[in-house]
Image (cartoon, rainbow, N blue to C red):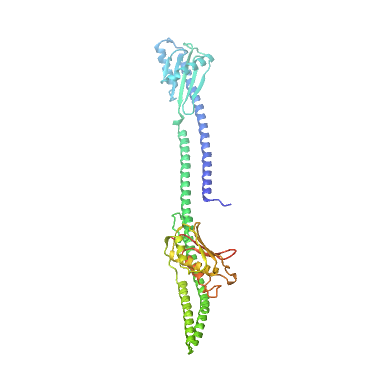
Amino acid sequence: MTVSLRARLFALWLMSLFGSLVVAVLILGLFRQTASAHRERDRAVAARACQAIEMHYDFYTAGMDVPPDSAIFDAGLRAVLLLALRRDRGVIGGIQPLDAPPRAMLGSRPQAWIGHITRQIGDAIAADRPAVTSNGGFFDRTTIATCPLGGALGTPVANLAAYTVLQSDLLRSSFTRFAFGGLAVLLATLLASAWFLARLVLGFSQRLAGVEAALQADRPGTLALTGEAELDRLITALNAATMRLDVARARIAESERLAALGRMAAGLAHEIRNPLGAIRLRAESGRSRDATRAAAALERILVEAARLETLTARLLGFATAASVQPVTVSVDALIRDAIGALPATGVMVVAPESGIVWTLDPVLTRSAIENLLRNAVEACGEGGTVTVLAAKAGALIVTVSDTGPGVDKSLGDPFEPFVTGRPDGIGLGLAMARDMIRAQGGTLVLAPSVGGAVLVITLPEVK
């Protein structure tokens, strides 16, 4: 089972996401523990401050000879608050009777606290013991402590209690800033890694798609570098392998051409020997004084010379490398021109209209189709039928079929030079047609058939 690079990178990002989530859960857990510790600390600070007020109040009222309803007494109460809360910064305190305004107060209290403080003072006096409450959430919490004043020494004022208020904001604490800073860093890291991996995968996929498209071309040539170091190393190796393959192909093509040249030389010797022998025989007959025999001998010599001239012309065409000149043409018109060049015979040639317009070399393609048609017409004989069909399926496909006896398998490869099943044939038609099609990057093959021969031309669109 193969796993793509994209899937591996995505799995890596999921692992980093899982690790970040674990760290985030740990940070949130520490934050909750810290918040709980802050709450307990605030309760302890408020309770201790309230107890300090109670202790200083007891000391202040012991043996006091000042009337409890005088301004001097209230000023002493304020002094009690200053002494008791001198070390507790941020703590608001006061001394307040039940159902009456405060007698002394240090710091201002918001309006929203008054009702809660009054109720808690009543509960503390009724229970005759301190009370501590916390209100709000993690980020905005108010802690209130109340203590009934009086004790073993008694109190000059009945139903009097002290209160302390401590307000805390965890958003301003150093640990909260650290926790939220850590979460922000984790989120930024996840987003940055996701963006980086997406860009990496997208860029790599686009470059890889470009390389695949170049490799799927009929003639890829040298692939351009992409700027991706790892991919460029592979492309460099592919380019080097392509160059070696091109050299090997050139050597194979040269070897095949030399082999074909050897076979051609053997066939050529055979083809030339027969006309030369006939010319020699007729020339000897022409030396006779009989004018009729001499005229017949000269006529035969002209026929054999014409045969040698045709053979020479076809050999020159076979040996000359084809130069491709692509033009966008109508395939139907091209087939009609090839059919029009055929000599008048008793063979019916059928070519249904296809309406295809294609870019190809019209001279080479028409010559190839004409060679196939000539072979098909000669193979059918009088009364036969030759069918030419053109279709488009990613490439241009031209099929030439006939109702003749088909290709004799004992002859070997029919595309080899000088391979022919007719006594008067030269055996270069199919070889030349295949070379013309190959020059355009196409193929010419003999397709399997039940009766007759079926030859198929496949041509990509020539750029």
Viewer-proximal residue among 172 and 366: 366
Viewer-proximal residue among 201 and 347: 347
Residue 411 x %, y %: 58, 72
Q: Is residue 331 visible?
A: no
Residue, x 50% and y 67% (percent of image)?
A: 373
Residue, x 46% and y 41% (percent of image)?
A: 188
Identify whether 447 is placed above or below 259. above
Residue 152 x %, y %: 52, 13
Q: Is residue 68 left or right of residue 131?
A: left
Total numbered circles: 0
Identify whether 8 is placed above or below 372. above
Residue, x 52% and y 46% (percent of image)?
A: 10
Q: Is residue 364 visible?
A: yes
List the single residue furthest toward the bottom.
289
Residue 21 x %, y %: 52, 39
Residue 37 x %, y %: 51, 29
Viewer-proximal residue among 38 and 391: 391
Identify whether 71 is placed above or below 179. above
Q: Quadrant of the C terminus?
A: bottom left
Viewer-proximal residue among 118 and 137: 137
